[in-house]
Amino acid sequence: DGGITQSPKYLFRKEGQNVTLSCEQNLNHDAMYWYRQDPGQGLRLIYYSQIVNDFQKGDIAEGYSVSREKKESFPLTVTSAQKNPTAFYLCASSMKSGAVTDTQYFGPGTRLTVL
Amino acid sequence: SQQGEEDPQALSIQEGENATMNCSYKTSINNLQWYRQNSGRGLVHLILIRSNEREKHSGRLRVTLDTSKKSSSLLITASRAADTASYFCATDENGGFKTIFGAGTRLFVKA
């Protein structure tokens, strides 16, 4: 899992609550990403950030929000507007977004369950 | 629809056998990557092949790329029980910023 950490490992949320998932990296990477993975499925991009104080929506951004105030940190908030938030959430970073040979390094993931 | 689609969806083999997984994609690409995911864990990068390369090796891994057919294959030779995992291909759609992941092939290696 390299130098990228996610917390908590497991998270339970009641309907109507917002929750924030933490992602920190010490790899000095410019770019960071949030993905959602449903059982037996691939990864779908929620948000990505190429540089501090800048981020873009991915394919499934509705009901989610992010911030990138520090290079090392890219927290994801799952809001009450996300209708089906139960999933496995993966954070990743890469040296520089948009580079042709950009390899992503992944955290261990957070499993979110809505009760 | 997904940019990268793996085939088969699941594969079960005996230890020592070779495992071959295929990936097809739809648009032009600059590179294609293969990642591995153990159950309930993050993804780990295995190998990257550029669009001007046809074959690449890394240990027991062999990756081929056929841009005319928009397809790639990952071969794991002499498989081990520890190779049991899901394997994903990932591409940069039309050479853009985003990396697009397929749904993965679930490999089970029986000891």
Image (spheres, rainbow, N blue to C red):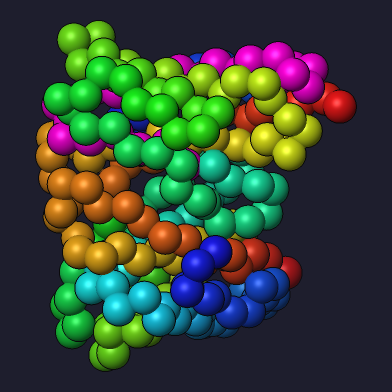
Residue at the top extreme, as displayed: B69
Q: Is residue B29 magenta?
A: yes
Asked whether the viewer can see residue B70, the reply is no
Residue A91: percent from left, percent from top? 45, 66
Q: Quadrant of the N terminus of chain B?
A: top left
Residue B13 appears left or right of B73: right
- On the image, which quarter does residue A84 sit in? bottom right
Residue A52 appears left or right of B73: left
Residue B15: percent from left, percent from top? 78, 22
| Residue name at image x 41 percent, y 78 percent | A25
User: Along the line of sight, which residue is nearer the eye, A112 or B90?
Assistant: B90
Q: Main secondary structure of the magenta part?
A: strand
**Which residues fall within the magenta stretch?**
B11-35
| Residue name at image x 30 percent, y 63 percent | A94
Residue at the front extreme, as displayed: B59
| Residue name at image x 51 percent, y 20 percent | B75
Residue B23 appears left or right of B19: left
Residue A22: percent from left, percent from top? 49, 81
Q: Is residue B107 magenta?
A: no
Give the vertical position of B107 relative to A83 (above or below): above
| Residue name at image x 65 percent, y 47 percent | B38
Asked whether the viewer can see residue B51, the reply is yes
Q: Tell how many labels.
A: 0
Q: Quadrant of the C terminus of chain B?
A: top right
Residue B82: percent from left, percent from top? 73, 39
Residue at the right extreme, as displayed: B111
- On the image, which quarter does residue B41 sit in? bottom right
- On the image, which quarter does residue A13 sit in? bottom right
User: Along the line of sight, which residue is nearer the eye, B2 or A14?
Assistant: B2
User: Along the line of sight, which residue is nearer the eye, A27 or A9?
Assistant: A27
User: Along the line of sight, which residue is nearer the eye, A80 or A111?
Assistant: A111
